[in-house]
Amino acid sequence: MMKVDMTSTQTSPSVKRERFRFTVSPIYFPLAIFCYGALGYLLAQYYYDLISPGLVLSDDENLRFIASFVVFSLLLVLVHEMGHVLVGKHFKLSWKRLNLGFGASVWLTGRRTVVQQLFVSAGGSLLQITVAGLLLLTVAYPPLFLAALIAIVEGAFNLFVPLRHSDSFKFYYCLWQIIRGRGKSEFKGVGNR
């Protein structure tokens, strides 16, 4: 019978790991909740006026609709960010930070190629559109239905309209680099050489 010595004096080299950080912007997050709430209020009025003209909602019903809409909208924003994280994990990137502000953002660290960054940039919007589309087809609860509809529009806008520092800007930048034959080069950020 073989004995195994569990008291080995070998120590693994110390690896300095960065801690995950979750931050909430004290200015932009309340602003986002206010904007989603205002949109939820307008949608509640329009939705109920559309299905039963002349119906006046009580304050409790309005508040319940708005709160549900805000919560579902923020959850779908987090689904978007999780799309980036899941694709990043597939490429062995580490998830360093999640920031909730006016929307959300996630920081992934690690070396990646231009092709990998293309998939990471598209992953958030594609997961958001997919989950919202499934909710749109399967759920009849009005606040969730409307939040899913807005999430599909947000996801498509984020993927196809190339605003500076957006997912689509990185997506089109990476696509341009791939067309130029630089797909296997390291991604160093948009505009960096």
Image: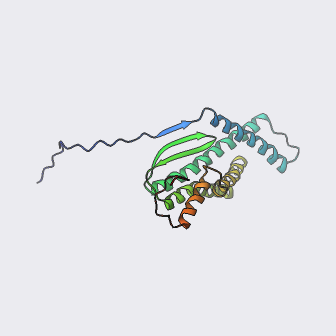
Can you give x and y, in whole percent of width and height, for residue 109 in the image?
46, 48
Quarter holding residue 62 = top right
Q: Residue at x 78, y 34 (%)?
A: 59
Is 20 in front, or is 56?
A: 20
Can you give x and y, in whole percent of width and height, for residue 93 in the image?
44, 52
In this view, which residue lies farthest toward the front? Answer: 193
In the picture, the quarter occupied by the N terminus is bottom left
Quarter holding residue 127 = bottom right
In this view, which residue lies farthest toward the left? Answer: 1
Can you give x and y, in whole percent of width and height, for residue 74 in the image?
63, 44
Query: Does residue 143 appear to the left or right of 74 in the view shown?
Result: right
In this view, which residue lies farthest toward the top? Answer: 26
Q: Residue at x 75, y 39 (%)?
A: 38
Q: Residue at x 65, y 34 (%)?
A: 30
Query: Does residue 15 appear to the left or right of 184 in the view shown?
Result: left
Is 18 in front, or is 171?
A: 171
Can you give x and y, in whole percent of width and height, for residue 177 in the image?
54, 62
Q: Residue at x 45, y 40 (%)?
A: 20
Is 85 in front, or is 161?
A: 161
